[in-house]
Amino acid sequence: MTIRNYFLNDFVAISFDNPLQLQITNENNEIQTVSFDEKVVNQNDGSTRFFVYFIPRSNLTALVCKEMILNYKNSIERAEQIETIPGRQGDLNIGKHRSIYSKRIYFYTESDISSSDLLILEKIAGENDLYLTFRNSKYLKTKMDIEKPQAFISHDSRDKEEIARKLAYGLSSRLCTVWYDEYSLKIGDSLRDSIEKGIKEAKKCILVLTPNFLNNLGWTKKEFDSIFTRELIYNQRIILPIWHNVSKEQIYEFSPALADTVALKWPNKEDFDEENYKKEVEILISKIHTAINN
């Protein structure tokens, strides 16, 4: 999970998005361009709106927040260009509909904001009668600590770039929490404890079965043994296998039980152009997502 995933998915009400840019003068008196995203959320019956912003990692995060607070009226003017009128079939509507703005602003930021900058933003917000909520690394950590992983991704590190990272990102973007080493391990963590906790808590365990995985007698073999043991002890079908460049005979040699488990096959890049390869990957990830939720 990333803070951007939560920005995209925290609010399930109707919304529309605006990509924005600001020209900001930094402390060295240089002009920098900062790109970020604005989401206008229509709440409840569609008559109440508020603003949500995602600001990628930047040393100018606090200044971007300041500009959006000071230019709150400009945000409303942009939002007024798109009208959403709630209603049901058979309604008879008369008069002029106007949206109400709640004066609450959410900032999702990849960079943390210093205490001194927060005090400045609090003062400016008070002067403009606005209420601010910041969601950053602390919010991300809290959410991930609370939410048990829905899937554990077991893979060989040599398959990370081609398969595992795409799989983890694709599931996370669907708000499916995953145990994946790049997301779940922090400096100082016990590798063994974290992996065992992930395997115990995850609803499903995805095995990325490749020649690299089958020939790895280290961590991936230990992970597989732990996952398979959980299936046996609790009589649960938790394994979701993905095959890539392996045969049924190779899988049988590794584990006869795995050869009898229905698997999905990761597409070969060589068989598709870039656009269709991405589509095939998205289809597979959607199938995995469905299997996790069943």
Image: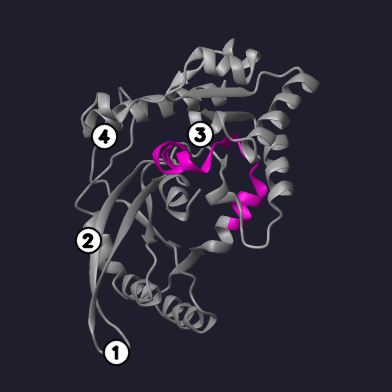
Give me the C-alpha separation between circle 2 and circle 3: 55 Å
Residue 20 among magenta residues: no
Instruction: Identify the amino acid type marked 3.
Output: Asn
Which portion, as a residue range, is magenta?
A: 141-170
Q: Are marks 2 and 4 in contact (CB under 8 Å)?
A: no
- Residue designated by label 3: 212
- Residue designated by label 2: 77
Badge 1: few (under 14), some or many (20 or more) residues near its Cα, within 10 Å? Answer: few
User: Reading the chain from its start, which is encountered first: label 4 or label 3?
Assistant: 4
- Residue designated by label 4: 93
Q: Which numbered disc covers residue 28?
A: 1
Relative horizontal placement of residue 141, taking residue 77 as reference (left or right): right
In depth, the one of 112 and 211 nearer the eye is 211
- For the C terminus, the quadrant is top right
Residue at (29%, 29%) from the top-left corner? 279
Using the image, determine if residue 212 lies above or below residue 280.
Answer: below
